[in-house]
Image (cartoon, grey):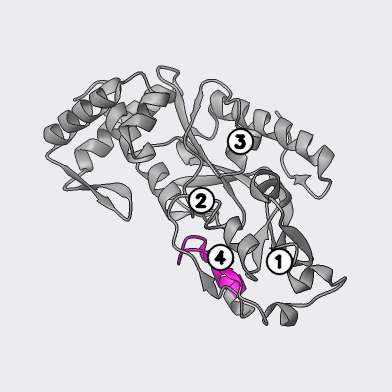
Amino acid sequence: MVDLDTLSALDALQWLRTGEDVAQRFPFSAASVSRYSKQCLDLYGLEMERVAGEWTLRGDTSLLMLQRQGHQQARWLGRRPLRLEATYWSGPLLCTPTPKPWLLGLSNIVGVPRNLQLLRERVVDGWLGALPDVPAADDPDLVAIPLSTMPVHFVAAPEHPLVRSSQITVADLAHYPTLALPENAYPIVERELKALGLWSDPVRMKRYRRDVWEGKTEAELTIGYGTVLSHEVSGGQLRFLPLQLPFVSGEVLVVRREFVDQPALKALVNHLLTRLDEWAGKYPEIELVAQSS
């Protein structure tokens, strides 16, 4: 058995990756993070190594998972802050300042798999993700709470030839490279765009970097993708093309099923809907699909 703070150090290091980032959000020094994490690993007979930049546990984690389950229940009961991860746009636009009792992560994890892993392993308590890449409705462990919908636009640099067009088709896009994010980062988006013959210019990125994502589209003839909210944060000089992707995006809050009726979750949903409603006043294409309770 380990106390709440000792295990929190290991959790936070897996989540935030560096002792310095942990120390900015938790009541530990960077040195304490390392010491407490080692205590946990030794107690449970585990090792930890970096895989593709992320801390991964090696060994039998069954006892650790039982401990994490109890500690997560304690967080939902208010004994420690709840942990929230978000996208690079929803973090600053919807979760800052972060409502109590939630603690916001770095909001820079690219893709779905790592975020869902942190939820399934009870390292984080909530993830503010985006449609369409969310857990299935029949997922036994996780539930996705839809908050809004909005179109996804093709985007390009101001000098891109297609920016001057008043009407374009997918066939027009095929003449130019289209941004391809890391393989399986967004499986549904990837499948839909590949079906259109797009997703042709790959980038390597596990944590969000504007210079690799939107910056690539600004600097080259590459065509990218974005919503009004992602554009608000990182759009820069990019321009929306007169064509939308064949699916909608939107904010979705994902949590473990057993906590779906917790008051702290309902309060967070209300906060997010209030912020989304404010942004919908500026961007009418944002549509709320849930109501405050």
> Please, what secondary structure does the residue beneath circle 1 have?
strand
Q: Residue at x 34, y 40 (%)?
A: 17
The residue that mark 3 highlights is: 92
Q: Earlier in the sequence, mark 3 or mark 1?
A: 3
Gap in Å between the C-alphas at discs 1 and 2?
Answer: 23 Å
Q: Residue at x 33, y 36 (%)?
A: 18
Q: Nearer the viewer, mark 4 or mark 3?
A: 3
Location of residue 199 in the rendering, given as x and y in whole percent from the top left corner: 57, 73
In this picture, is 98 found above or below 225? above
Q: Residue at x 61, y 72 (%)?
A: 178
Q: Which residues are magenta?
A: 178-193
Gap in Å between the C-alphas at discs 2 and 3?
Answer: 15 Å
The residue that mark 1 highlights is: 245
Location of residue 148 in the rendering, given as x and y in whole percent from the top left corner: 71, 45
Instruction: Give the crowd class for mark 3: few <14, some 14-19, many >=20 residues within 10 Å.
Output: some
Q: Earlier in the sequence, mark 2 or mark 3?
A: 3
- Return the mark for residue 168: none
Location of residue 14 in the rendering, given as x and y in whole percent from the top left corner: 32, 40
Gap in Å between the C-alphas at discs 4 and 3?
Answer: 25 Å
In this picture, is 178 found above or below 119? below
Give the amino acid at mark 1: Leu
Give yes or no for contact between labels 2 and 4 (Cβ–Cβ under 8 Å).
no
Q: Earlier in the sequence, mark 2 or mark 4?
A: 4
* Left-right relation of 131 to 114: right
Q: Nearer the viewer, mark 1 or mark 2?
A: 2
Q: Is residue 58 visible?
A: yes
Q: Nearer the viewer, mark 2 or mark 3?
A: 2
The residue that mark 2 highlights is: 209
Q: Nearer the viewer, mark 1 or mark 4?
A: 1
The residue that mark 4 highlights is: 188
Instruction: Give the crowd class for mark 1: few <14, some 14-19, many >=20 residues within 10 Å.
Output: some
The residue closer to the viewer here, 134 or 245, is 245
